[in-house]
Image (cartoon, helix red, strand yellow):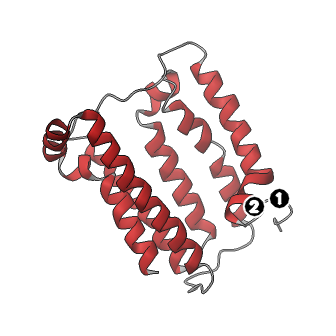
Amino acid sequence: MAQLILGLLVFLGAHSISIVAPAARDRWAARLGANAWRGLYSVVSLAGFVLLVRGYAVARHSPVLLYVAPGWMRHVTLLLMLPVFPLWLASQLPGRIKAAVGHPMLTAIMIWSFAHLLVNGTLADVLLFGGFLLWSVLDRLSFLRRAERPLRMAPPGRWNDAIAIVAGLGIYAAVLLWLHGWIIGVPLVGALP
């Protein structure tokens, strides 16, 4: 469990610098240079991600059960997950979805983490998904007091929303039918009550 917690602290901590210390982040980026800052940020984020994935995998071998969700809640989770991948893609493909939602990636993380908390009741699940939910809500709220940093993304285009929806639903189908079982070890199709 310690590895999962450390991974969450490193990964979400790196992603929280702009939330808690935007001026310090800008000073460090200016001092190091943009590319060196991105490189350092990427290495720290990757290290945190590896720690949290490994920590979560280890914690799943000796689960500490906090709650058991009713079987029908899995259907609610699958329904809530439908917009997650289109929103994730819309964050990189500016269009009407991005304009309407504002921060589609944060919204996708909020939905993803909340949906998973509905059906996963071990301590490791609550730490992982609860940590991401809390972080994404705090990050979203931080935009009330800070300016959004311009990010590299595709240029605005009239087909971006259609691409985000179609490709996002395609990714959803792949995750549902195959990827979740292959990567996470928990198949979704055939596992529903």
Q: Would you say residue 143 is visible in this rendering? A: no
Give the side of residue 75 with respect to residue 147, left or right: right
Check the image and name the residue furthest to the top. 158
Q: Would you say residue 56 is visible in this rendering? A: yes
Give the side of residue 10 with respect to residue 113, left or right: left
On residue 181, the disc is: 2
Q: State the image coordinates of residue 116 (x, y, percent, origin top left).
A: 59, 62
Look at the numbered disc 2 and give the secondary structure of its residue.
Answer: helix
Residue of label 1: 189
Tag 2: amino acid = Gly
Name the residue: 25% across, 46% down.
18
Look at the numbered disc 1 and give the secondary structure of its residue.
Answer: loop
Q: State the image coordinates of residue 125 (x, y, percent, origin top left).
A: 54, 72
Observer-nearest residue: 18 or 43?
43
Q: State the image coordinates of residue 157 (x, y, percent, origin top left).
A: 53, 13
Find out whether the residues at labels 2 and 1 contact each other: C-beta distance under 8 Å. Answer: yes
